[in-house]
Image (cartoon, rainbow, N blue to C red):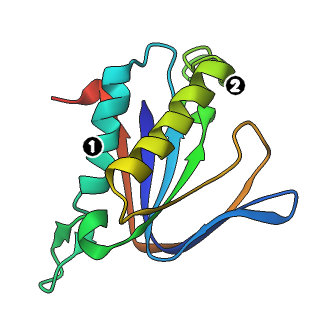
Amino acid sequence: MKAVVQRVKEAEVKVDGKVAGKIKAGILLLIGIGKNDTAEDLKWMEDKIPNLRIFEDENQKMNRSLLDINGDLLVISQFTLFGDASHGRRPSFSDAAPAETARQMYEKFCDDISKSYPSIKVERGIFQTYMQVNLLNDGPVTIIVDSKERR
């Protein structure tokens, strides 16, 4: 699984001009599911994201997590994170999971975060639709997380 983690003051996602998900301060998470991703990748990401210390403490050091600040989480499925543009001019998305597999893992990720961390407000986009995302990036702080690069 690949994720782009953006610390935001606020963010929203619209589908057909209507707000599908909206958060205040927290994380906008663009998440991609790969064809080789497993339940182990999912579990690792479910632990990593809420506990990632990217929010500043009283000394302006990134020592606080989403849980520490009682922040919100907006999760957007994004298969294009698996785009490979190393050959030619059009990216290949052959490493992305098939749509139904990706949908199940995306929904499970969102549901599991809600259950495991009830203090986190979890909002989401609508899977496999054209979405428009608006955000106010805070910092800016943007981190790339890849479950295959875990140690």
Separation of residues labelled 1 and 2 (CA atoms): 36 Å
- The amino acid marked with disc number 1 is Asp
Q: Residue at x 35, y 66 (%)?
A: 119
Report which quarter residue 123 is drawn in. bottom right
Report which quarter residue 37 is drawn in. top left
In the rendered image, residue 36, in percent from the top left (x then y), is placed at 44, 13
In the rendered image, residue 53, in percent from the top left (x then y), is placed at 22, 61
Residue position for label 1? 47
Question: Which quadrant of the rendered structure holds the C terminus?
Answer: top left
Report which quarter residue 64 is drawn in. bottom left
Query: Height in image: 28 above or below 10?
Result: above
Q: Residue at x 15, y 86 (%)?
A: 58
Residue position for label 2? 89
Residue 107: which disc? none
Per the image, label 2 sits on a secondary structure element best described as loop
Viewer-proximal residue among 31 and 50: 50
